[in-house]
Image (tube, coloured by chain):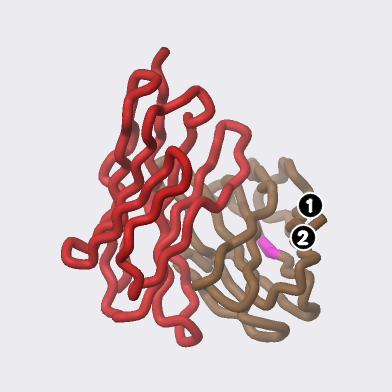
Chain colours: A brown, B red
Amino acid sequence: EAQVTQNPRYLITVTGKKLTVTCSQNMNHEYMSWYRQDPGLGLRQIYYSMNVEVTDKGDVPEGYKVSRKEKRNFPLILESPSPNQTSLYFCASSLIGGVETQYFGPGTRLLVL
Amino acid sequence: AQKVTQAQTEISVVEKEDVTLDCVYETRDTTYYLFWYKQPPSGELVFLIRRNSFDEQNEISGRYSWNFQKSTSSFNFTITASQVVDPAVYFCALSEAPGRDDKIIFGKGTRLHILP
């Protein structure tokens, strides 16, 4: 089954404790992306990747890191989480770029205390 | 800079009524793509439609239809005869300059309520 998976689905952590949210897709998509969803703000793109070893900033990259060492994986790293990073995070992938249909993962709900 | 505005934060309609969700966009590019996604109460994001800037034909898919008007930079979405399966947050999105800047900008979404 074609899908985008994210782990964990729910996470409670404390300020400053490094964490990684994993994202994996099995569709051989070149483009992968991370979004955060906050009430009243909609979806905002954090980082995206056009292909292996190619990443770029979205609209809200501060406080986040990503890496793309393999085509199928695109982890989101919060080196020192803060309460303002409490949010619902979605990973997405598409065939070749932002102009293609995005396939979204199920979301990761993060609470930073 | 690219921008997507969904002015309607929430809309309520009575079941079986038609409803139109507005989407206005801003872009400097002549080549761009517009999307609509649905987020039902279960939380997943579901693709509805993708339209490129060179195709202004309106599209109909069952009870859904989309009206793309470049003259007013709008890409509105109409649900005909609304049903109990339609409550969701609906997002409009824009991607411009394919291959050059693959950012995607989403609107803030419109939450649709269906009243019995």
Instruction: Read off the chain for label 2.
Output: A
For the residue carrying disc 2, how many other residues have a C-alpha within 10 Å: few (<14), some (14-19), or many (20+)?
some
**Residue lying at 47% horizontally and 73% vertically, measured from the top left:** B103
* Residue A79 magenta-highlighted: yes
Given residues B70 and A88, the one toward you in this image is B70
Q: How far is mark 2 from mark 1, CA to CA?
A: 5 Å
Q: In the displayed structure, does residue B5 sit left or right of residue A70?
A: left
**Residue lying at 65% horizontally and 49% vertically, measured from the top left:** A15
Disc nearer the start of the sequence (2/1): 1
Q: Which residue is mark 1?
A: A7
Residue B73, position in %: x, y?
23, 63
Quadrant in which residue A12 is drawn? top right
Q: In the displayed structure, does residue B22 sit left or right of residue A71?
A: left
Q: How many marks?
A: 2
**Residue lying at 80% horizontally and 65% vertically, measured from the top left:** A26
Q: Which residue is mark 2?
A: A22
Given residues A32 and B114, the one toward you in this image is B114
Q: Amino acid at mark 1?
A: Asn
Q: Residue furthest top?
A: B116
Do the CB atoms of the residues marked 2 and 1 lie less than 8 Å apart? yes
Check disc 2 and report its element: helix, strand or loop.
strand
Instruction: Read off the chain for label 1.
Output: A
Instruction: Identify the magenta region.
Output: A76-81
For the residue carrying disc 1, how many other residues have a C-alpha within 10 Å: few (<14), some (14-19), or many (20+)?
some
* Residue B17 magenta-highlighted: no
The image's mark for residue A82 is none
Residue A73, position in %: x, y?
77, 70
| Position above or below: B49 against A12 | below
